[in-house]
Image (cartoon, grey):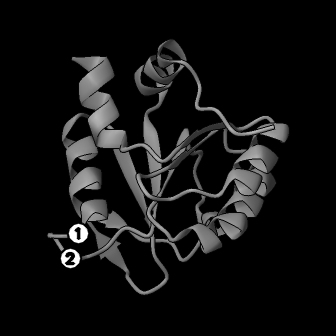
Amino acid sequence: MSFQNPPGDEIRHLLKTAKTIAVVGLSPKADRPSHGVAKGMQRFGYRIVPVNPGQSELLGEKVYPDLLSVPEGIDLVDVFRSPEHVDEVVDQCIARKFPALWLQEGVVNEKAAERAEAAGIMVIMDRCLFKDYLLYMN
């Protein structure tokens, strides 16, 4: 069985209902895609929870070393890590029962995505959250 992204209406519903996005791998460098996407989503009204063990504050928010350390509920986990790190992120999403996982463009790990789906997590893979927001919400 090969992974398939949810249909557009489900992605649109997720974008409409999500309020808090954990961004795993958020870079402090303004020229990095993770920084631009997170800042853009923040401007669209989402609360961003940065996850990066090497930082303490990004985009005006406290940074957490991993998803297990995040104290509040997360509606969507957006991942800017290379595919070999996705298994650990999926483990943490399953442990915390986060409802949705978004793997950015170029982040492809079908086995991890299928494992997350089997645990009841909605998964979007190899797509840009910011671009899909512009596509589905405008």
* Label 1 element class: loop
Residue wearing tag 1: 32
Residue wearing tag 2: 29
Tell whether label 2 touches label 1 (CB within 8 Å). Answer: yes
Residue occupying the point 72% across, 65% down: 87
How packed mark 2 is, by other alpha carbons closer than 10 Å (few <14, some 14-19, many 20 or more), is few
Residue occupying the point 20% across, 76% down: 29
How packed mark 1 is, by other alpha carbons closer than 10 Å (few <14, some 14-19, many 20 or more), is few
Q: Position of residue 11 (x, y in %)?
A: 49, 24
Q: Is residue 123 visible?
A: yes
Q: Is residue 9 above or below residue 126?
A: above
* Label 2 element class: loop
Left or right of 37 in this view: 65: right
Q: Is residue 59 visible?
A: no
Q: Which quarter of the rendering shows the C terminus?
A: top left
Q: Is residue 126 above or below residue 99?
A: below
Task: From the viewer's side, name the closer residue of 7 and 133.
Answer: 7
Task: From the viewer's side, name the closer residue of 59 and 131.
Answer: 131
- Please, what is the three-letter code of the amino acid marked with disc 1? Arg
* The furthest residue to the top: 9
Q: Which quarter of the rendering shows the N terminus?
A: top right
